[in-house]
Image (cartoon, rainbow, N blue to C red):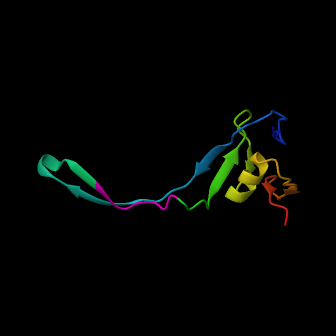
Amino acid sequence: MPKCPKCGAEIDHLSQWRKTEDKYHFSLGEGEDVITEMCLPRDSQDYDEADYECPDCAEVIFNDYDTAVDFLAGREVTSISPENVITKTE
């Protein structure tokens, strides 16, 4: 099982935080009730702008999908970015 490089805990999953953007129509109905309708849903396959945290210490250890998958699969990921986040070794 992989270990968090920051706290050493054995982990079988990561916590993923990602920013998403949805487009809604926003209007007022009777009695000034707010009506929102989603008109452009987020792209669920867009993994840009994601942080992957250790579920034990809550430190960000990855910031891209492929590296997080490689880590959980037991493949080597050893390059550390200036922000002390692990990135994929090419």
Residue 22 in the figure: left or right of residue 53: left
Rendering coords of residue 59 (x, y %): 74, 41
x 84%, y 67%: residue: 90
Where is the N terminus found, in terms of image quarters?
top right
Q: Which residues are magenta?
A: 37-44
x 68%, y 48%: residue: 52
**Does the rendering let one see residue 75?**
yes
Q: In the displayed image of the protein, which residue is found farthest to the left?
A: 30
Residue 29 located within the stretch drawn in magenta: no
Rendering coords of residue 26 (x, y %): 28, 58
x 70%, y 55%: residue: 63
Rendering coords of residue 73 (x, y %): 77, 48
- Residue 36 picture quarter: bottom left
x 17%, y 49%: residue: 32
Residue 40 located within the stretch drawn in magenta: yes
- Residue 65 picture quarter: bottom right
Q: Is residue 25 above or below residue 51?
A: below
Rendering coords of residue 88 (x, y %): 80, 60
Q: Is residue 73 above or below residue 24?
A: above
Nearer to me, 78 or 7: 78
Residue 9 in the figure: left or right of residue 54: right
